[in-house]
Amino acid sequence: MAAGWPCDGLAPARAPTYLPPMTKKLRLDIWSDIACPWCYLGKRRLEAALAVFPHREDVTIAWRAFELDPSAPRVRDGRVGSAARLAQKCGMSVAHAEKMLQQMTETAAGEGLDFHFEKAQSGNTFDAHRVLHLAHERGVQGAAKERLLRAYFTEGAAIGDPETLVALGTDAGLDRDELRAVLAGDAYAREVRADEAAARELGITGVPFFVVGGRHGVSGAQPARVLLEVLEKAWAEAGEADKHAAEGAVCGPGGCG
């Protein structure tokens, strides 16, 4: 994880009280995919942690791209269900796969999510990640992320189909014409690849993966209490950084110390 940036002052001096207080922000980067059930659960658990985090309004969130299956076609053959695909991928019986999906559905229900794997239309998520980068620039990334996840896991939307993405992005507050233009070209492809390269550099092999404050990594859909603990620790550390910044070396009438 990225290290902090300590500031070593030669002669600490308290900042004058008439200066406005420094505004502290906590950055949260989350690598995740759309076709990832644990990513949706992780999002809900994060929201539960943020709901009781007293500095929620000072947390900035960026959703980063991670493709679980970059080789997937835009839309897979709908005649092959989720259980059959899971069984083939993991080398298990269809019955066992069905049981795993049922357990996942029950776990999701415990977080207030309504999963319907029998409806899921598996496909490539690269374009969906491009839409999320557009949404980040337009200030609606959180809404777009939620809309895409709900569309895939609850509504059975074909998340790799461009026109489906246009409709879902519009629901989230994006401009329909701009969405079509983005999806017709290669806009934000570089940004998606940069996210994936950063994931490799950080050693991220599974999602969701949270990086809090640029230095604390949390792997998996951890319980809300665990995420809250990390948020609190990162916030306290950010406060120490602000203190050092506010109490650095100064020059006064008697010289510089």
Image: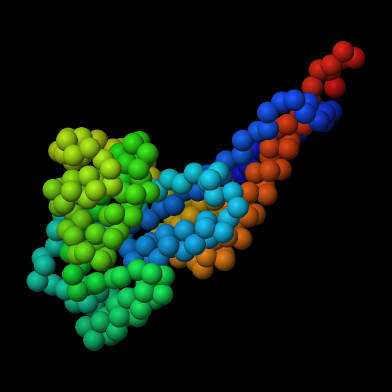
Farthest-out residue, right: 254
Q: Is residue 168 above or below residue 38?
A: above
Q: Is residue 242 above or below residue 145?
A: above
Q: Quadrant of residue 255?
A: top right
Taking the spot 68% from the left edge, 28% from the top edge, the residue there is 20
Taking the spot 30% from the left edge, 70% from the top edge, the residue there is 114
Taking the spot 41% from the left edge, 53% from the top edge, the residue there is 31
Give the left or right position of residue 18, taking residue 70 as reference.
right
The reply to whether residue 126 is in sight is no
The reply to whether residue 48 is in sight is yes
Q: Position of residue 18 (x, y in %)?
A: 75, 25
Taking the spot 48% from the left edge, 55% from the top edge, the residue there is 210
State the residue in front, 187 or 106.
106
Q: Is residue 95 above or below residue 143?
A: below
Q: Quadrant of residue 81?
A: bottom left
Give the left or right position of residue 56, taking residue 201 as reference.
right
Q: Position of residue 199 (x, y in %)?
A: 42, 50
Q: Position of residue 108 (x, y in %)?
A: 37, 72
Q: Position of residue 98 (x, y in %)?
A: 25, 82
Q: How many marks?
A: 0
Give the left or right position of residue 100, taking residue 225 as reference.
left
Which quadrant would the C terminus be assigned to in this image?
top right
Give the left or right position of residue 226, taking residue 135 as reference.
right
